[in-house]
Image: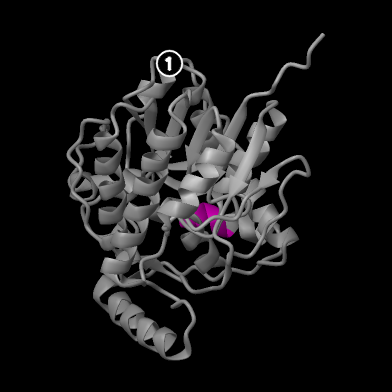
Amino acid sequence: MPEIKKPTALVTGAYGFVGPHMVRLLSQNGYDVIATDHPNVKPKLLPADVDFHPCDLTNLSDVERMMNKYQPDLEFLVASIFRYDIPRQTILKTNSAIMENCLRATREYNPNVRHIVAWISSSVYGDSFKNIMPGTSLTEDAPMLPRNAYEESKFLQHIICRQYNDLPLTEIFPMAIYGPGGNYGAMVVIDMMARNQLPGFPGGGKNRISLVHVTDVCRAALFLAQRTDTIGKRYNLGDSSNYTIKELMKWLKVKFNHLGVKVDLFPVSYPLWLMRFFAWRSEQIARKHKHPPLVQRDFLGYFDKGFNFLVNSEAIRELGFDFLYDNLYSGGLRETLEWMKKEGQI
C-alpha cells in the first residue's frame, strides 16, 4: 500500500516561548512540522523530526519562498515581538509586517491551506478591562481599546487578519501566558518575585486577573484548527481563576518557600508613580548599556487602579474544549516554578 502522507503544519516563532510548545504538540499528534524563526534568534531544542527553516518574517520575499516551498496544510502564526521597551514605531511596523507577510504569502503561494490560527492577545481589550463589574468578564465582542504600543501592534495584527477574510483563518486571544520556557506574560511577575524585585504589592495588588497555561494555549490552537466551524471567528483563552494580584503573589511566595527559594514579600503597597519613576531610570540605564531594563513602564499599566483583567472563554468551552490547567490549584504554576529551579533561573 502507498504510504499515507502526514499533514504538514507551519509554526512561526518556533524559538520563542509558545512556539516550541506548539511544535512539540504537533509533532506528538502526527504532523510533519515546519518550524521557523529569525536566523539570528538563539536556537532552542526541538524534536528531531522537525524541519527548521530560518526566515525573516519581516521580509516578504523570504516568507514567499518558504510558503512556496512547503505549502503547509495548517499554519500557526505565533511570531511577534513581545516587549514594552522598544520604540513604538518599531514594534508597530515589525508586528504588522510579520502578520501581513505571512497572510499575503499564504494567499499567493498556499491557496489550499486548510486552516490558519493567528495569535493575537487579550491585552488588546485595554481600557475595556477598566471597572469591570464583579462577577463579569470580557467576551469576544468587547471593544478593543489598546493602551500601549505592544497592544496597538496586536490590534493592528487583528485588523490585518480581518482583511484576509478569504482565508480559512481563526484568531486566538490568550490572557497572560505562563509555563515552562516562559519569559513574558505572567512570567514577568513570577521572575521579578524570584529575583526579589517585588517585595510588596504594586498599586495595592487589588487588580483581578485570569491567566492561561502555555500548554492550554497550544492545545486550544490545535483544537480550533481541526474544525471548520471556527473559521472566521475569534476566541478568548483564559482559565477560570479570578484572583487578585495580591492573592497570586502570596501564593507564589509560599510555593517559592517550599522549593527552598527565599522570597521577601512585605504587607506594603508600592505607589505606581514611584515604580514608574524607577522604571524610567531603569530604561535609561538599559539604553546606555544596551541591555533590557529591569522594569518596563508600559508593563506597570497592568497594575493600574480599577482594572480587572478577566476574559470569558465560554465560546471555546461550548465547543467541547477543556482546560488542563483551569485555576491556581491545577498544578501549572507549581510545575512552572519547579522548572525555573531546575533550569537555574531561581
Q: Nearer the viewer, residue 339 or 199?
A: 339
- Crowd around label 1: few <14 · some 14–19 · many ≥20 (10 Å): few
Please give the name of the residue rendered at 54% of the width and 73% of the height, measured from the top-left corner.
196
Q: Quadrant of the C terminus?
A: bottom right
x, y percentage for residue 205? Answer: 35, 58
- Reading the image, the residue beneath label 1 is 228
Please give the name of the residue rendered at 63% of the width and 24% of the height, measured from the top-left corner.
7
* Bounds of the magenta segment: 249-253
Does 3 appear above or below 146? above
x, y percentage for residue 61? Answer: 44, 53
Image-based side of 59 in relation to 255, left or right: left
Quarter of image, res 54: bottom right
SS at badge 1: loop
Does 314 appear above or below 305? above
x, y percentage for residue 263? Answer: 58, 68
Image-based side of 112 in relation to 313, left or right: right
Image-based side of 305 in relation to 45, left or right: left
Q: Is residue 96 magenta?
A: no
x, y percentage for residue 265? Answer: 49, 68
Does 26 appear above or below 121? above
Residue furthest out toward the top: 1
